[in-house]
Image (cartoon, grey):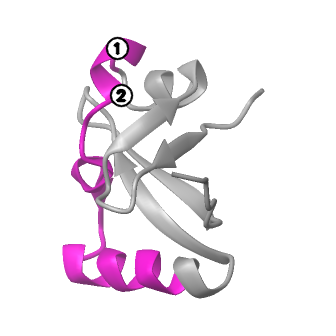
Amino acid sequence: MHEGAVTVSKEGIVLYSNSYFANMVNLPLSQVIGTVFKDFVTGISKEQLDVFFEEAWKSPSKKEVYIQSGNGKTIAVLISLNALLVDN
């Protein structure tokens, strides 16, 4: 896959990340999982990001934001959010 993919809990914790996303943020995959997703996002207030995530629980959403990589590089990305409801 040539796209970054993450699964984020309702609390914003990265539960899953593919290696492409880890490369985008210039971190080992093991350091991405368990982090707070908001820590990677820049160029948008944390409050705006919270609203965007809340909207995604109602219907799929897309938004362009900027991801800050570990080496200081800023990358424009299109985030596509879909709620996944899992039993238990």
Give me the residue at 60% from left, 37% from top. Answer: 4
SS label for mark 1? helix
Mark 1, residue position: 30
Mark 2, residue position: 33
Q: In which quarter of the image is residue 18?
A: top right
Give me the residue at 59% from left, 25% from top. Answer: 20
Disc 1 marks a residue whose amino acid type is Ser
User: Is 75 left or right of 81, judged from the image as shown?
Assistant: left
In the rendered structure, are the residues bearing label 2 and label 1 in contact, judged by CB atoms less than 8 Å apart?
Answer: yes
Disc 2 marks a residue whose amino acid type is Ile
Q: Is residue 9 above or below residue 21?
A: below
Taking the view exactly as shown, the residue that stands out farthest to the front is 88
Question: Residue 42 — which label?
Answer: none
- State the image coordinates of residue 74 (x, y, percent, origin top left): 36, 47
Q: Is residue 48 above or below residue 29?
A: below
Give me the residue at 51% from left, 51% from top. Answer: 88
Magenta-highlighted residues: 27-55
- State the image coordinates of residue 85 (x, y, percent, origin top left): 61, 61
- State the image coordinates of residue 54 (x, y, percent, origin top left): 43, 82
Q: How crowded is mark 1: few (under 14 residues within 10 Å), some or many (20 or more)?
A: few
> How many numbered marks, from 0 up?
2
Instruction: Kindly tell me whether residue 87 is visible in this rendering.
Output: yes
